[in-house]
Amino acid sequence: MADLPCTLAEPALRARLADALDADGKIPRTLESLGPIADRDVLLFDSDDGLRARQLRDLGGRVTVVPQDAEVGGLGRESADVAVILWDSQAEPTPECAARYDAIGPLLRPGGRLLVLLNYGRDDVARLLPRERTTLDYSSLRQRDTWFLRRGFKLRVIHGWWTFESIEDAASFLADGFGDAGADMAVTLRRPRLSHKMVVYHRTHPPAQLDDADADTDAVAAAETLAG
């Protein structure tokens, strides 16, 4: 599941989305710029050793794939430089997600990085996912007091695409994968791609201890960076 931002039941549909999603490689480039990944020990919390693991290895990372539901306590303190979590959370993480982020901290060496990739909304993809994965209100990601910003994370927005070979190919995938919502979107296509905004929340370990004033300052800075 973590390789992809949404649930598709059929393997053929998942393969088609994997080919279309982020065809220009913005996700791995962003993770590298925030990690970095090259020549680092990387923990990837993923359902299997798939697309993202291969991309991280291509960047030169020594990748260990950890099942998303695994207990992290036995992985070894200060054993990794980077931890990557993909699409398993929301703007206000569930208690389980929040506990996982806290538990990952001790696995990172000093200066290590926790990177959390999420959908960001206000794009074509959000129109296909009417709260299909979570109860996420995407607008809450843009507020200055989000759960992540209050806990020392900064953010990097990725303006990505789902890119297909043709409009006909895109329309077929949308109808097959998303039913009526996909078919409705297909008739509006003017080019063979869909906009997909993503955000990487990133934090250095150990995280800075923020008081309320610091949290407000960091949130404003992040919002100004995004606006720029």
Image (cartoon, helix red, strand yellow):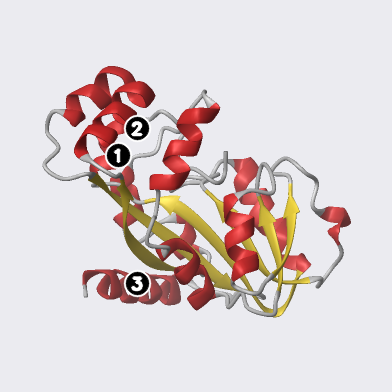
Of badges 3 and 1, the one in the foreground is 1
Of residues 13 and 217, which is closer to you in this image?
A: 13
Above or below residue 209? Residue 166 is above
Residue that badge 2 annotates:
129
Q: Is residue 63 left or right of residue 116?
A: right
Residue 73 badge: none
Residue type beneath disc 1? Ala
Give the residue displayed 31% in from the left and 72% down from the top: 220
Q: Quadrant of residue 78?
A: bottom right
Percent of width and height locating residue 9: 52, 23
Q: Secondary structure at mark 3?
A: helix
Local packing at callout 2 (Cα closer than 10 Å; few below 14, some 14-19, many 20+) is some
Question: Which of the image's four quarters has the C terminus?
Answer: bottom left
Residue type beneath disc 2? Leu
Residue 126 badge: 1
Q: Secondary structure at mark 2?
A: loop
**Are the residues tagged 2 and 3 within 8 Å (C-beta)?**
no
Q: Is residue 25 left or right of residue 99?
A: left
Give the residue displayed 32% in from the left and 45% down from the top: 138
**Sequence-first disc among 2 and 3:** 2
Residue that badge 3 annotates:
222
Give the residue displayed 58% in from the left and 75% down from the top: 209
Above or below residue 158? Residue 14 is above
Give the residue displayed 35% in from the left and 64% down from the top: 157
